[in-house]
Each structure stands twice: as structure tokens, then as C-alpha cells.
Image (cartoon, helix red, strand yellow):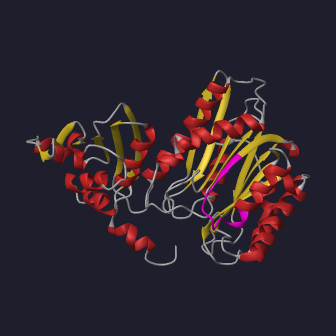
Amino acid sequence: MSVTFPLGFRASGVASGIKESGALDLAVVASETARLYSAAGTFTKNLAAAAPVLLSKLHLESTAGYVSAILLSSGNANAATGKKGDADALSSASTLAGFLGAKPTEVLVASTGLIGIPLPIQRLIGGIPNVVESLGSDQENGLIAAKALMTTDTFPKVATFEIRGVRFGGIAKGAAMISPNMATMLAVVTTDSIASPETLSTVLGKAVDESFNRITIDGCTSTNDSVFVMASGKSGIELSVDELQLGITMICKDLAGQIVFDAEGATKVIFVDVTGAKNEADALRVARKIAESSLVKCSFFGKDPYWGRVLSEVGSSGVDLDISKVSIAYGDEVVYQNLEELAFDKGYVENVMQDHEIHLVVDLGAGTSDATIITADLTPAYIAENMRTS
């Protein structure tokens, strides 16, 4: 199950022809019978934000956070496409609204794929009747919607969670161009809790900060990053803010982890755990500096515990600290401390570097705050995937 796990949601996906391969490329997550549900979104802070991002922000503002559906397409980002791109985004929302019996402003849109290439809008619009006709609330409907979001993903990303009889679900896509600065490529979270748009907005912002904003694959922030949440209220239960926060955060963390696991060409998932910082901001800054270092990422691909590269990133992070108090560990084995390499169990560290999931632990010796950024190794396969337009 995924977005159709909570009560009151329908979903589906079809092949509309946006992708020349004929693969699924158009998805809808919708309410029952065009009912308005409370909703919220977080979006990329990239100044080159795509037309769907700009339109969805406008629609959420104009409806005060009440929408009927989300239209998602893959294979073309509709980014850097000028006024034609803006018109295409609006046209797609208006067409779906017409088939659902909703207003155009009650439909949000999101796209992912190639940047700077005109959206084949007639193909997309041609697929809308089919995707509406196939909408359903069973498990397969949610899975098909998730598959329709995929570009270079190798598997559909879905998640579910439940608290006190209230259900949460989610779908996402992403495998590269990942260094979210608000959210991730595309994600939709649903719940059948009673919740206002204002509450959803606050909770989603925090959930995103603790999940999608703490992953990075290549340090690149997309033009199309969007995360949406919709609440149907169909459970008849209004969770506490803390319970709602837990549910949405759990879905976001689950989806974010799957994105790094599916990173293009990756062989390893690396948890950069920074401890002993003066504050969380310092911990995050150091962790991200390490996680986005091409040299560090290459050393993980090579299974080489080259702590010198890690230390260099700590020292150049811009955080005010005493470098003599920094220690570095691979797994549970400290390899560097007090400005020099330690005598460490090389066999243990070699085994750590063979694992698919690795914890790199850096203690700054400056306080009690900590933070983790999750990343992947850098491999020849990533370069092969991205050396041309992709």
C-alpha cells in the first residue's frame, strides 16, 4: 500500500507518451468525487524553479490549502520552458479539473525529467482521460502511481505508517540530482487524519527538514523538488500535533532513505554521523560538507578508509572548532584522534568498508549536538548515467 492506504484517496498511473519508451509517465492522486481536502506543500528553493512548482504554489495560496487532486508527470521537467511552459502547466491542471469536476485551482501539478525541453503537452493531456478512468483505492492503484513517477529509479518508492487507527501513506521518486533544499524530487504524502492546512504546513516543513533535507547524492538541487501532503479526515480522528508530526515524518524518512538506497550507480549508503558539535547547525554543516565531497565518496567506492579526506572536509567546513579535538571512526573503530592516526583494528575496518550501509562517525569535541546526513558513494556508473543529457 502507499498513498491509497489512508481512507478517502484514489490513485493511478498510465503511459501517455511523454516517455518515448512507452513506460508509465502520468499519475494522479485524488480525493473521492472531487471533494476538497486540506493540503500543504514544500518546494525547491532553486531560483530556476519549474513551471509546475510555481503553479502549485499559486494554487495552494489561492485555495487557502484545499485541493482535490495532484497531477504528476515524469520524463519531462517542464523547467526553463518560458511562458509556454507556464501555459502547459495550467492547461494540464485545467484539463484534469474538468474530468474530475473540480476547479483548476484545486489541482496541483508536478513534473520530473529533462530540463529545457518543451513538454509534449498534447500527449500529456491525451493521457488524462485514461488516468482518471483508472483511478482506484486499492493497493495496486497506489503502486502504479509510484511507478509512473520513475525516471532513472530502479524501483517504485512507497511507504505506509499507522498511529491510533489513523493511516499515512506516501510515494516518491528520485535517484540523482539530489541535494534537496526543502524537499525531494517528487513526493506525495497522504493521511486520513483530520488536520487543517495550517497544521499540515507546519508539520510537513519540520518533517522535510528531518528527512529529505538530510540526504544528498550529488549535491545538486533540482528545479522541480516538490513534496505534497493531503489529509482526507476520513478516519474521523484528529491526532495531536505530535502524533501527526510522527506519522508524516516517518513516511518522509522512509521515502528519503529509499532514494539514497536507489542512488544512480551507487554501491553503498553512507551515514555521516557528526557528534559533539556546539549546535545542530554546526553538526549539519560539517556532515553535509563531508557527504558532498567527491573525494570522500570515491574513497567509499574504493573501500578505502582514507580518513585524511574526511579531516580535510571538517577543517574546510567553515565551522569554528578546535581541530585537535576531532576524532574520526568507521563504524565503532576510531582511526584518528588528537591530530594523528591511531593504531586500529584494520581487519574490522576493512569489513566495515565492505558493507552496503556504512556509518562514518566524526566527533567534533565541541559540545553535545549531533546530526546525520545520508549519502551514497560515487561510482563510474554514476558518471556513465550523467555524462549526457539525463
Taking the image as shown, residue 358 lies to the left or right of residue 205, namely left
- Range shown magenta: 41-52
Q: Quadrant of residue 92?
A: bottom right
Of the pair 80 and 366, the residue shown nearer to us: 366
State the residue lying farthest toward the top.
Answer: 164
Q: Is residue 293 visible?
A: yes
Picture coordinates of residue 316, whole percent (x, y)? 32, 56
Residue 155 highlighted magenta (yes or no):
no
Q: Quadrant of residue 83?
A: bottom right
Residue depicted at 25% across the width and 40% down the height: 331
Taking the image as shown, residue 121 lies to the left or right of residue 103, namely left
Picture quarter with the N terminus: top right
Of the pair 94 and 276, the residue shown nearer to us: 276
State the residue lying farthest toward the left.
Answer: 343
Disc tally is 0
Residue depicted at 75% across the width and 37% down the height: 198
Picture coordinates of residue 172, whole percent (x, y)? 59, 51
Residue depicted at 29% across the width and 62% down the height: 295
Picture coordinates of residue 181, whole percent (x, y)? 55, 54
Q: Is residue 306 visible?
A: no
Of the pair 179 and 348, the residue shown nearer to us: 179
Q: With respect to residue 125, does 316 lie above or below? A: above
Q: Quadrant of residue 326?
A: top left
Picture coordinates of residue 101, whole percent (x, y)? 92, 52
